[in-house]
Image (cartoon, rainbow, N blue to C red):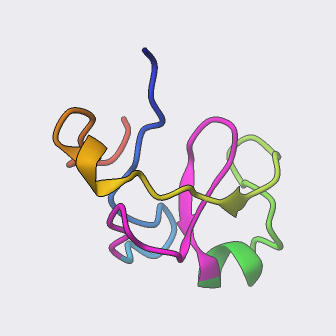
Amino acid sequence: MSVLELRPRCERCGKPLPNESPDARICTFECTFCAQCAEGELNSICPNCGGNLVVRPIRPAELLERYPAAESEAP
């Protein structure tokens, strides 16, 4: 099963975005930004691919052990 990569921080300002954060925004390539950056200067558009940024879903706690959030940023 392929699962969504839960990146740990905003790619623009570095704000921590743990799994349970309601402030995380992502595009279809899983680029990750905080709500302040996404809805502010970025105008809900990913600067990397031009796609829209939407609220990242929160992975249920019981699945985090089997499918953990990323510990580092994408390359």
Residue 50 vertical placement versus 12 (above, below):
above
Residue 16 location (% of width, % of height) = 33, 73
**Closer-to-camera residue (54/37):** 54
Picture quarter with the N terminus: top left
Write the start and end of the magenta stretch as one range.
Answer: 16-35
Q: Is residue 12 left or right of residue 19?
A: right
Residue 53 location (% of width, % of height) = 74, 58
Residue 30 vertical placement versus 55 (above, below):
above
**Closer-to-camera residue (53/61):** 61
Picture quarter with the C terminus: top left
Residue drawn at point x = 40 percent, y = 48 percent: 6
Residue 37 in view (yes/no): yes
Please, which residue is most extreme toward the top here?
Answer: 1
Residue drawn at point x = 38 percent, y = 77 percent: 15
Tell me which secondary structure the magenta stretch mostly adopts: loop
Residue drawn at point x = 47 percent, y = 58 percent: 58
Residue 40 image-quadrant placement: bottom right
Residue drawn at point x = 28 percent, y = 56 percent: 61
| Magenta stretch holds residue 20 | yes
Residue 47 vertical placement versus 21 (above, below):
above
Residue 41 in view (yes/no): no
Please, which residue is most extreme toward the front here?
Answer: 62
Residue 45 location (% of width, % of height) = 80, 59
Residue 24 location (% of width, % of height) = 53, 67
